Amino acid sequence: MSVPRKASRAVVGTSEPAWVRRLLIGLALGFVFLFLLLPLATVFTEALRKGLPAALQAMREPDAWSAIRLTLITAAVAVPLNLVFGVAAAWAVAKYEFRGKAFLTTLIDLPFSVSPVVAGLIYVLMFGAQGWLGPWLAAHDIKIVFAVPGIILATIFVTFPFIARELIPLMQAQGTDEEQAAIVLGASGWQTFWFVTLPNIRWGLIYGVILCNARAMGEFGAVSVVSGHIRGETNTLPLHVEILYNEYQSVAAFAVASLLTLLALLTLLIKSVVEWQFERDQKAAASLPPERPSADALPTARTAG
Amino acid sequence: MTTAVFSLAAGVPRHRTRRVLPGFHLTLGYTLFYLGLIVLMPLSALLFKTFTLTWDQFWAAVTSARVLASYRLTFGASFLAALVNVVAGLLLAWVLVRYQFPGKKLVDALVDLPFALPTAVAGISLSALLAGNGWIGQYLAPHGIELAFNRNGIVIALIFIGLPFVVRTVQPVLEDAEKELEEVATCLGASRWQTFCHVLLPTMAPALLTGFAMAFARAIGEYGSVIFIAGNMPMVSEITPLIIIGKLEQFDYAGATAVATVMLAISFVLLLLINALQGWQRRRTGGHA
């Protein structure tokens, strides 16, 4: 680093002049207003353009109801399956050392970087009429693509890494001391998991589930490829929004969209609360006197934030 | 990919032991089984389908004029949007970490809106906002500026989608940055701007690059928010994911698969790049990303 040797001013601290601060805050708030708040407000004003009754009417349509039901079913299957996987994967990756671990975590991340459209396509290629298992499925009269199972599978794929990737760094950070102690004291593996590990990872777990659920209910691209768009049968809420919008039923489209927006806002709220709780727990844990001599001997021991 | 962005564990010290707890075979076995079933088997179906094409067929499918135009658009728009995200993300992260102002917690929570809001909702909302009769569009239309239903709309949608990535990768780095270094620079006579350029920016560089790569990778695959605002004119404003959908709708499974394979290869390269960047970041900050 090169620093010119001019006469240094008295120590001015490490903050910017007030006008720079105000300018930067102003710019940031302006950006947030334009790119985040205005789109948010647009959803609700467009939904209420013809008054509340018209908006509510759009949600009472049978097609809207079946879309809501399908979205709830999809999330109710996809989230628990990914939760079980997430916990198992985090346990395996965080608590043990084995060869190929880095490669395994990269593979777990893979669905995040695959385009949703490609995610849908791969299930069509596997289960579709011309796909791998297509002829066999047709012979046994099982429908997966352009039916509910395909929608659920595509949703599981796009939300696959959420919970695992939340838990892995958390469990790695916590190490294995506490589990080790429980096992030595005679607890079974399950008891150790339920009474030692689970309480430690609870905030990360809730966090992952919330984000996984938001994506599961809101996924559009992947589901759109495998759905077949059969009204009242294979339309999830986001697909229903698209259909209404393309039919120029703007108020109805935004009314249904506002349901999804409320879900997003609820997700953000729970997420923030979880973050605050986690920070509070971390601070509380840091202020406790060390129970083990090694606790403060760890050179890297620091608290979050 | 989104992991580093949403990570409660960012500030927790890392600590590993090699001692053995029960459940290794059970959990690793289930992990591999589920990974194979949900991710690897369907992805290999894509590759096998690609291998049924001859090289000429494959090459023709992935380099037709319309597909090439879509690559140019997708990459160009994603690049532009990711660049804007770096600047805006750095600004937001800076303001959120360094300054106090009313509504700060609200802004912090709101930054994640693009992750939580379904992409289709973002798409119709942005197009309503920017269309000729929308809140913003009505002021621009008389000046001949059209932001919706053309390439401009694509970039704006992608900026929206990618916004949280840079903010969430830079924020923890800025929080951990040692103020002492800045004080030293100031004492040595550096101006605030010099300190920023020569002390802070190098510290944040890996995080900024990671955020850029994440936003870029997400933008390339993005479909839901873009199609509502793009206008979707072939050769002009048709993104690559839409090409795949179009081919599927014409039952051209081979063509769709070929283009999808190209996209898959690109996303895999980007994933490896992001992993490498995060490794760099970890070495820089000594312990955690």
Image: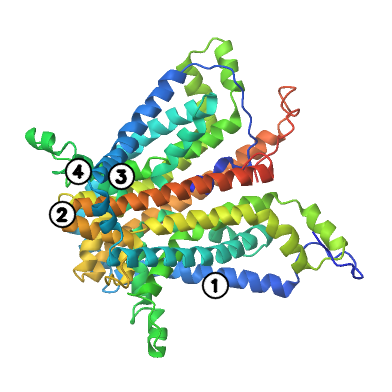
Kindly identify which chain the residue marked by label 3 belongs to.
A
Q: Position of residue B54 (x, y in %)?
A: 24, 48
Mark 3 or mark 1: which is in front? Answer: 3
Classify mark 4: helix, strand or loop.
helix
- CA separation, marks 3 and 1? 35 Å
Q: Name the secondary structure under disc 2.
A: loop
Q: Give the left or right position of residue B235, taking residue A280 as reference.
A: left
Q: Nearer the viewer, mark 1 or mark 4?
A: 4
Q: Which mark is residue A30?
A: 1
Q: Is residue B206 above or below residue B94?
A: above
User: Residue at (18%, 55%) from the top-left corner?
Assistant: B252
> Label 2 to label 4, Cα distance in Å?
21 Å
- Badge number at residue B251: 2
- Say which of B272 and B226 sits in front: B272
State the residue in front, B75 or B208: B75
Position of the C terminus of chain B, as image quadrant, is top right
Tell me residue A55's x, y (percent).
Answer: 25, 66
Q: Amino acid at mark 4?
A: Val
Residue position for label 4: A148
**Tag 3: amino acid:** Thr
Identify the mark nearer the N-term, 3 or 1: 1
Q: Quadrant of residue A5?
A: bottom right
